Each structure stands twice: as C-alpha cells, then as structure tokens.
C-alpha cells in the first residue's frame, strides 16, 4: 500500500473510534491527536481553544416550537396579530442562525462552550503567499431526517433529472416556510394557511428534537477524510518541500453546529492574513465516489464564493493533476468556507457526491471507515498538493 494511502486509512480509522460531538472531551482528544500527528511531519502546530455558542438542533427546535405557539395564537381572533408578529420574528431568527448571521437568538439562549482548532504551519515560512487548507474534526448528530432512501429512489427512476440539478435541495426553506405561513395567514386572517404552518412547525419541532437526542455518527467521510488529507499533505510537503508558499493546515472544531470553531479562527488569525495574498481551500466530506468543486453555498440566499479566478485555478490544477472535479455545483447547506469568503478571501470548497448527487452516508451511523471511497480521498490529496504547487509557481512567476 502506498505510504499516503496508508496514512489516509490510519488517520480515519484512529479518529473514527472517538465520539467527537462539538465541544466534547472526544473532540478535544481528536484535536490533540491531530496536532501530535502533524507535529511528527515537522509542522509548527498549535491547538487554539475557542468559545462557541452551542446550538443547531436545540436552538432551531426551540424556534420551531415558538412558531407552533405562534400558530396557536394566530388561530385566535384576539391574539391573531400577536401570533403573526411572533411567527415573523421566528422566520428572521431561523434565517439569521442558519445563514451565519449575527445569531442574536442563539447568543441570547445557547450556552457558551469550548472547542479546539488545530493550526499547523508548513511550506515556505519566508513566502508572502499563504494557502489555508481547511477541514473539521467534530462529528455530526444523526437523525431520521437524514435517511436518503427517497433521494436514492428518485435518482434510480429519474436519473436525467438528477443529472440536470446542480444545486442541492433547499432543506432549510421547509423550516422557514412554516412560520412564514403563520405570519402571512395571521395578517390575512386566513385560518387554513395558519393551520398548515402550525402543522408544519409541529413536524419541524419533532424532527429537530429527534436530531438533538441522537448520538453523533462516526464521521469518517464527514469529515475525517479531510483531516486525513491534511496529515498526508503535510507528509508530502515534508518529503518534497515547497518554495514560494506558506501553508496553514487547519482543522476546526464545532463545524457541525453550523460553524462554531471557524469564527474563533477568524478572530484570532484573519488579522495576520493579507486578503490579497491568502487563499482558502476548504475540504469537506471527500470520501464519496466523485469529487466536486462548489461554486458557492447558501442555506437561504445563495452566495458564490469570493473570487472566481481562484476556483478556476483549482479546476485547472485538478485537470493537470489527474484529479478532475465537477464544476457548477452549489450547496444549500453551510460549510466553514462561508466565513473566509465573506471576509474577502478567495475561497472554494472541495467535496464529493455519489450517483444521486448526495454525500455518502451523510450524518448516518453508517459513516464508518469501511464505507469511505479511499480512491476519492487520494484524489483530493493530489488536488490539494497541485493547488499549493500552482499557487507557489504563480507567485514565483514560473
């Protein structure tokens, strides 16, 4: 087995044994294991303790439950306007939370917890240019909502439709639309619309309560595959040094609460990173059969990543390195990449998909090392190295 393939398997298999819920002792143990493993390659490594507001399922479940109460109020004659107003506020709060806005509701209601970001430095320390390769090491909660049987059924019967759709389904729109129906129905005195929104909010509350109580998955594909690429990339750069480019290999914690650790990384490290000379390559779930390059993401409003020229550079590097990616894809879920992109850094995300354009074993107990496509992970490693070497050559004027 080639050395890098062995490294990829070693990292994924070792860390998948840890229960890595955001902010948990297992997440800290994983972070320190990754730091030690990267230090063995010669990287300068630190583990940053950061604070984040816990949330996701419980926060959004509370908002959905509030919409349910608002729906009950909106059905009453005297409380109709109050119910509509509360429902409208819930819509705004959900959109704010899932879109990485100020998160006022989460900050007011969710506890502060500690997460751990691993930051490793390698490459050419004297270089002016910097490539930040991002991953995350916490694991996602499971839940009935992540059953992908329906998508697989649809993909088998309508493969042409699946092939033409390059933007994932807007999953958060369903949660947003229920309190929106209550607000609009309350204002228009349309009891049927209110009742539909009320029923949908009850379902949404139940779905999120289910996610909140479930254990986390092993998280092999999402996102130990990317962590493994960081370690293997550090080994390659140790064996074949790179001139003209500094690298930060960063594995964030608490990504699965809809971006926790990356905010701490931004506050601590962005001031030292020149926007004109820094690029972010985010790796997220690269163990499905086919690599894809995301052009943008947006749970509510789609945002293309900052600076298309970097995405084009990544696409060209992928072709030259023999690790081609599918272009034109956009995601309705969020990743850590949205934070550097909004800050004005050239950014893109490399992820992967199966034949139904789904992430393999997404948030399921079957997300184990045995179900990872290691060939795709190896191609992601090849791509990451190619991007680094192309950026270095571009900086040197080669």
Image (cartoon, helix red, strand yellow):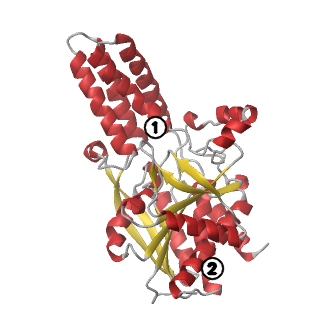
Q: CA distance from mark 2 to mark 1?
A: 39 Å
Residue 151, above or below 227: above
Q: Which percent across, then down, holds residue 221? A: 63, 55
Q: Tell me what residue is drawn at x 31 percent, y 47 percent.
A: 103
Disc 2: which residue: 235
Furthest residue in direction right, as rendered: 1
Per the image, label 1 sits on a secondary structure element best described as helix
Residue 18 visible in this rendered orientation of the protein: no
Q: Which percent across, then down, holds residue 285? A: 60, 56
**Viewport quadrant of the N terminus:** bottom right
- Name the mark nearer the viewer: 2 or 1: 1
**Viewport quadrant of the C terminus:** bottom right
Q: Tell me what residue is drawn at x 51 percent, y 68 percent.
A: 310
Q: In this image, 359 relative to 257: left or right?
A: right
Q: Label 2: few (<14), some or many (≥20) within 10 Å?
A: many
Q: Label 1: few (<14), some or many (≥20) within 10 Å?
A: some
Residue placed most toward the observer, 215 or 132: 132
Q: In this image, 98 relative to 326: left or right?
A: left
């Amino acid at each position: 087995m080639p050395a890098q393939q062995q490294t990829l398997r070693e990292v994924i298999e070792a860390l998948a044994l840890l229960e890595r819920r955001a902010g948990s002792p297992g997440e800290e143990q994983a972070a320190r294991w990754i730091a030690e493993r990267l230090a063995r390659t010669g990287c300068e490594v630190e583990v940053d303790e950061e604070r984040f507001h816990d949330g996701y399922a419980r926060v959004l479940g509370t908002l959905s439950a509030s919409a349910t109460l608002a729906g009950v109020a909106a059905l009453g004659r005297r409380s109709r306007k109050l119910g509509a107003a509360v429902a409208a506020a819930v819509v705004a709060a959900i959109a704010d939370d899932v879109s990485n806005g100020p998160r006022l509701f989460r900050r007011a209601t969710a506890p502060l917890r500690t997460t751990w970001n691993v930051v490793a430095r390698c490459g050419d320390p004297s270089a002016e240019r910097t490539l930040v390769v991002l991953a995350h090491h916490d694991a996602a909660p499971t839940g009935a909502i992540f059953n992908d049987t329906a998508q697989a059924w649809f993909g088998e019967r309508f493969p042409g439709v699946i092939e033409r759709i390059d933007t994932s389904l807007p999953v958060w729109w369903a949660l947003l639309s229920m309190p929106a129906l209550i607000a609009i129905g309350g204002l228009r005195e349309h009891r049927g619309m209110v009742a539909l929104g009320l029923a949908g909010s009850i379902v949404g509350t139940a779905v999120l309560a289910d996610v909140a109580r479930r254990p986390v998955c092993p998280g092999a594909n999402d996102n130990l595959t990317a962590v493994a690429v960081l370690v293997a990339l550090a080994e390659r750069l140790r064996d074949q040094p790179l001139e003209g480019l500094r690298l930060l290999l960063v594995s964030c914690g608490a990504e699965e609460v809809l971006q926790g650790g990356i905010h701490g990384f931004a506050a601590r490290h962005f001031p030292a990173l020149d926007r004109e000379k820094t690029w972010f390559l985010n790796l997220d779930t690269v163990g499905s059969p086919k690599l894809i390059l995301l052009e943008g993401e947006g749970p509510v409003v789609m945002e293309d990543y900052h600076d298309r020229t970097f995405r084009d550079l990544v696409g060209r590097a992928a072709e030259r390195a023999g690790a081609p990616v599918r272009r034109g894809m956009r995601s309705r879920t969020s990743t850590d990449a949205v934070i550097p992109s909004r800050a004005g850094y050239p950014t893109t995300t490399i992820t992967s998909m199966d034949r139904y354009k789904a992430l393999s074993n997404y948030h399921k107990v079957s997300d184990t090392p045995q179900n990872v496509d290691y060939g795709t992970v190896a191609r992601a490693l090849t791509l990451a190295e190619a991007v680094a070497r192309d950026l270095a050559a571009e900086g040197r004027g080669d």
